[in-house]
């Protein structure tokens, strides 16, 4: 798809901004980058169009959602940075706790849609991610500036908000940890290790969903996006289509968890060989 090159350029510029701390000037840079990218995508859609339903779904679900979600993220974080207490640490902790509570309410309100996306379902994609359902927009007061009737679907903004709020939750938690003097060195310096993921991204997606299903992170409270972003940072890979990849894994004939079965086979083989010595 011609839009992939635009997103690749966006991701390269985004990396420079993400490596810096959440200062207001850098947040402003992020907002400008997102707006510039969304404007370019909108102009490309007007010029070249989306000729098939599949292309339209992919664009609004996987392409536009990337810069739009980061625009919402930078807007939310910028608001927090401007409104947070400056001196009293206890007040800062209370502030971040209140913001986390608001995020929880958002996820609870939209839990059915979040579940649909995290499970990699696709049966309602034509309803959610094509423009034929323009009359069924979820209403978010004060967010009309995000919408363009010729460049929106009923759920593309909601999907972008879900992705953005998952990142905002990470930002809020890390901010609280910093106030409390808790540091997560593994997350602060991901480039210090020498591990490189050399298997396929499909295999990594299979592993991520296995860990998610096993509820091994945060007492089962971590969601797919949290786990995926942690793996992306640690291994330096991009998994922009993790939900779609999972859907293809579910649709396999015969043995579906092939990578996990392969790991089990190799581990069992290694133990058998060691016992035979």
Image (tube, rainbow, N blue to C red):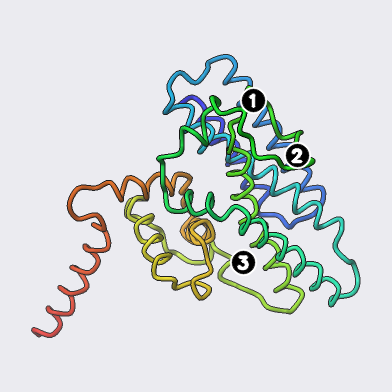
Please identify, in this view, whether the residue under mark 3 or under mark 1 is nearer the observer.
Answer: 1
Q: Position of residue 74 (x, y in %)?
A: 72, 48
Split into 4 quadrants, where in the image is the N terminus? top left
Residue on which the image places disc 3: 188
Q: Is residue 49 above or below residue 159?
A: above
Q: Is residue 189 above or below residue 204?
A: below
What is the distance, in whole Å, between disc 3 and disc 1 at their CAs? 33 Å
Please identify, in this view, whether the residue under mark 1 or under mark 2 is nearer the observer.
Answer: 2
Mark 1 lies on a secondary structure that is helix
Q: Is residue 195 above or below residue 61?
A: below
Q: Mark 3 or 2 closer to N-term?
A: 2
Q: Which mark is residue 40?
A: 1
Mark 2 lies on a secondary structure that is loop
Q: Position of residue 82 (x, y in %)?
A: 86, 55
Q: Position of residue 87 (x, y in %)?
A: 91, 71
Q: Do tag 3 and tag 1 residues touch (Cβ < 8 Å)?
A: no
Q: Residues within 10 Å of mark 2 (few under 14, many from 20)?
A: few
Q: Residues within 10 Å of mark 1 (few under 14, many from 20)?
A: some
Which residue appears at 60% of the width and 50% of the height?
162
Residue on which the image places disc 2: 143
Which residue appears at 59% of the width and 34% of the height?
154
């Amino acid at each position: 798809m011609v839009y992939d090159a635009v997103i690749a350029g966006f991701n390269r510029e985004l990396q420079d901004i993400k490596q810096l701390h959440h200062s207001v000037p850098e947040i402003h840079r992020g907002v400008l980058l997102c707006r510039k990218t969304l404007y370019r995508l909108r102009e490309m859609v007007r010029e070249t169009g989306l000729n098939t339903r599949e292309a339209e779904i992919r664009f609004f679900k996987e392409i536009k959602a990337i810069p739009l979600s980061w625009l919402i993220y930078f807007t939310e974080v910028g608001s927090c940075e401007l409104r947070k207490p400056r001196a009293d640490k206890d007040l800062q902790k209370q502030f971040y706790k209140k913001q986390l509570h608001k995020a929880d309410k958002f996820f609870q309100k939209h839990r059915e849609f979040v579940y649909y996306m995290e499970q990699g379902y696709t049966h309602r994609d034509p309803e959610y991610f094509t423009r034929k359902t323009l009359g069924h927009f979820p209403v978010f007061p004060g967010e009309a500036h995000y919408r363009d009737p010729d460049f929106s679907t009923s759920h593309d903004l909601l999907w972008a908000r879900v992705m953005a709020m998952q990142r905002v939750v990470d930002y809020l938690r890390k901010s609280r940890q910093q106030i409390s003097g808790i540091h997560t060195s593994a997350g602060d310096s991901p480039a210090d290790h020498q591990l490189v993921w050399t298997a396929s991204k499909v295999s990594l997606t299979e592993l991520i969903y296995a860990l998610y299903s096993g509820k091994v992170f945060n007492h089962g409270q971590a969601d797919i996006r949290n786990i995926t972003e942690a793996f992306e940072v640690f291994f330096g890979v991009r998994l922009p289509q993790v939900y779609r990849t999972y859907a293809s894994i579910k649709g396999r004939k015969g043995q579906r968890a092939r990578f996990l079965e392969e790991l089990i086979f190799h581990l069992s083989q290694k133990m058998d060989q060691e016992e035979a010595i």
